[in-house]
Image (cartoon, helix red, strand yellow):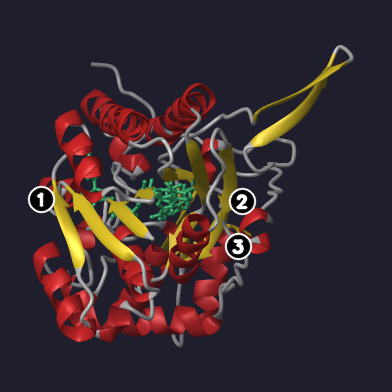
Amino acid sequence: MRILVLGGDGYLGWPTALHLSQTGHEVAVADNFARRGYDNELGAESLVPIESLQTRVAVWRELTGKSIGVYIGDLCEADFTSAMIKEFRPDAVVHFAEQRAAPYSMIDRKHAVYTQVNNVVGTMNLLYAIAEIDPSIHLVKLGTMGEYGTPNIDIEEGWLEVTHNGRTDRVLYPKRPGSFYHLSKVHDSHNIEFACRIWNLAATDLNQGVVYGQQTPETALDDRLATRFDYDAVFGTVLNRFVIQAVLGRPLTVYGAGGQTRGILDIRDTVRCIQLACENPAQPGEFRVFNQMTESMSIKDIAATVARCFPGEVTIEHLDNPRVEREEHYYNVVHTGLVELGLEPHLLSDTLISSLFDITKRYAHRVNAELMLPKVNWRVSAV
Ligand code: NAD
Ligand code: USQ
């Protein structure tokens, strides 16, 4: 298949592009390097050094003989997005290209507005490009488990059968997310479902949980193919951060009581899920939703697991929670769709955590400890 990976320079987009190329698909990536710009803005950097996109693609070609096409541009520029779709004519578009950090979206009004404009407008431009150029292109869109929030009922895969006053209907699952970033994904989901309904587009919305890990078989082939590994309090995600904190001998920063429970998955399962979604497309007119996670864990259990695996002393500190979120709640998620397509999950293991300790030790000298503590607060202060 011809597959276009939007956000192909990012943490997940790059390993996904390599995996799809390795499995025989014709791949191109697109990116505007916004993510590298946020690092400059925040004074942060990936713990593991990353090469430029151009070098990454050249190394992949040198090692495997496989080419990956490159489009550099902003999805919010409709002309760029349309021209790229017209030129590459993909069978599937995998859309990772959004501002993805909840804390970044909660810095202030400017960052909240940027996040929603970037994410919602980029996706709208893509929907129009697909509808106008070739409605048979399958859109595989990265959403997030956080769209659902933490409801007191089971979380279904995107849709809910409701009986109300004796009548029954199938409705989009009600959403109650926890940041302006997560809300941008809800807005995207509604826009995509509408486009499927009115233009007969085929889309898969992947509500992905928190990803952990840094290597896939393809990125591990050469240091120059490495993907990013973020530890700062804005872009670092929880398990990756705890691993790095353990190695540095710093307390693991559990926010609040730590009873918050999240769906999680290994980066090797991310790339496999995307492959499965592309190779088994949604039908014309179908808005298909999968919950892309392999297990649920509370934050305090993630901290305890990392502490248990670390061959040394680890302290766990409960910080005042900078976020507004439930710290104890019901959480039961249906996630059978991708398993039915053939996903064989890598569940969190001591071996994986130990391999992350090794990666961290190798690059520990690059850490700027000041970036570890959370400074973005969900509550607004009076001006
Ligand atoms: P990332 O920030 O590393 O990658 C996103 C890439 O998209 C970046 O390279 C960025 O430069 C690019 N981009 C952003 N806006 C763009 C635009 N307007 N035009 C072109 N390129 C643009 O993020 P990631 O961790 O790889 O996440 C990828 C996707 O998966 C995101 O949509 C995110 O919401 C979703 N997701 C991530 C996780 C996770 O744990 N990392 C979990 C669930 C869902
Ligand atoms: N947390 C801590 N300590 C930390 C960091 C986080 O206790 O040092 C807690 C947070 O309060 C939150 C949970 O861990 O309850 C998850 O936080 P996170 O930063 O790991 O993840 P989140 O903000 O939810 O965002 C990440 C990605 C995002 C993706 C999302 C999937 O950055 O792109 O959409 O995970 S999900 O959470 O399923 O929505």
Label 2 sits on residue: 259
Q: How many marks?
A: 3
Q: Of label 1 and label 2, which has the lower sequence position?
A: 1
In this rendering, the answer to whether 108 lies above or below 104 is above
Q: Amino acid at mark 1?
A: Asn
Whether residue 230 can be seen here: no
**Dot 2: within a 10 Å radius of its alpha carbon, few (fewer than 14), some, or many (20 or more) residues?**
some
- CA gap, disc 1 and disc 3: 33 Å
Q: Cβ–Cβ below 8 Å for labels 2 and 3? A: no
Q: Give the amino acid type for the residue marked by disc 3 in the picture.
A: Thr
* First reached walking from the N terminus: tag 1 or tag 3: 1
Q: Is residue 14 above or below residue 383?
A: below
Residue at x 27% of width, y 68% of height: 227
Which callout, 1 or 3, points to the residue nearer the camera?
Answer: 3
Q: Which residue is mark 1?
A: 40
Q: Is residue 112 above or below residue 332?
A: above
Question: Picture quarter containing residue 167?
Answer: top right
Residue 74 locus on image (x, y percent): 17, 39
